[in-house]
């Protein structure tokens, strides 16, 4: 009697190996997702408000564009 591919896989113990590999891939994907969420969460809290200029001279990009002394 000829074996099917599923019986051959089970006989060789490859079903356990395939299950372990798939489990490792799922855990790895979940770990990467969690790390990405933590990274973006930290960045969201780390952002600071932009500081507005305190004097009119601060808005000019270079010294030559400022008001004359």
Image: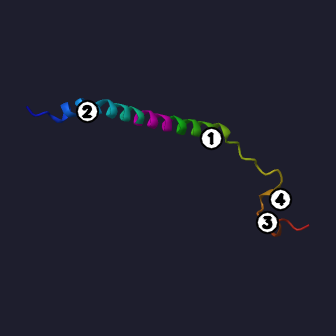
Look at the numbered discs 2 and 3 and tell me whether their residues touch, using CB distance below 8 Å. no
Look at the numbered discs 3 and 1 and tell me whether their residues touch, using CB distance below 8 Å. no
Cα distance between the residues tagged 4 and 3: 9 Å
Q: Which residue is mark 1?
A: 43
Secondary element at image label 4? helix
Q: Front-most of 66 and 9?
A: 9
First in residue order: circle 1 vs circle 4: 1
Q: Which residue is mark 4?
A: 57
User: Is 17 placed above or below 50 here?
Assistant: above
Look at the numbered discs 1 and 4 and tell me whether their residues touch, using CB distance below 8 Å. no
Residue 16, x across and y down, in percent? 32, 29
Say few, some or many: other residues with alpha carbon within 10 Å of mark 4 (under 14 / 14 to 19 / 20 or more): few
Look at the numbered discs 1 and 2 and tell me whether their residues touch, using CB distance below 8 Å. no
Who's the residue at 83% across and 65% down the image?
66
Q: Which residue is mark 2?
A: 12
Secondary element at image label 1? helix
First in residue order: circle 4 vs circle 3: 4
Say few, some or many: other residues with alpha carbon within 10 Å of mark 3 (under 14 / 14 to 19 / 20 or more): few
User: Is 50 placed above or below 29 here?
Assistant: below
Secondary element at image label 3? loop
Q: Which residue is mark 3?
A: 62
First in residue order: circle 3 vs circle 1: 1
Residue 48, x across and y down, in percent? 70, 42
Cα distance between the residues tagged 3 and 1: 31 Å
Discs 4/3, front: 3
């Amino acid at each position: 009697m000829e074996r099917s591919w599923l019986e051959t896989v089970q006989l060789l113990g490859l079903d356990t190996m395939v299950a372990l590999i798939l489990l490792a891939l799922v855990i790895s994907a979940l770990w990467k997702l969690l790390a990405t969420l933590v990274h973006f969460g930290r960045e969201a809290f780390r952002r600071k408000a932009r500081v507005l200029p305190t004097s009119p001279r601060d808005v000019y990009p270079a010294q030559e564009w400022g008001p004359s002394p």
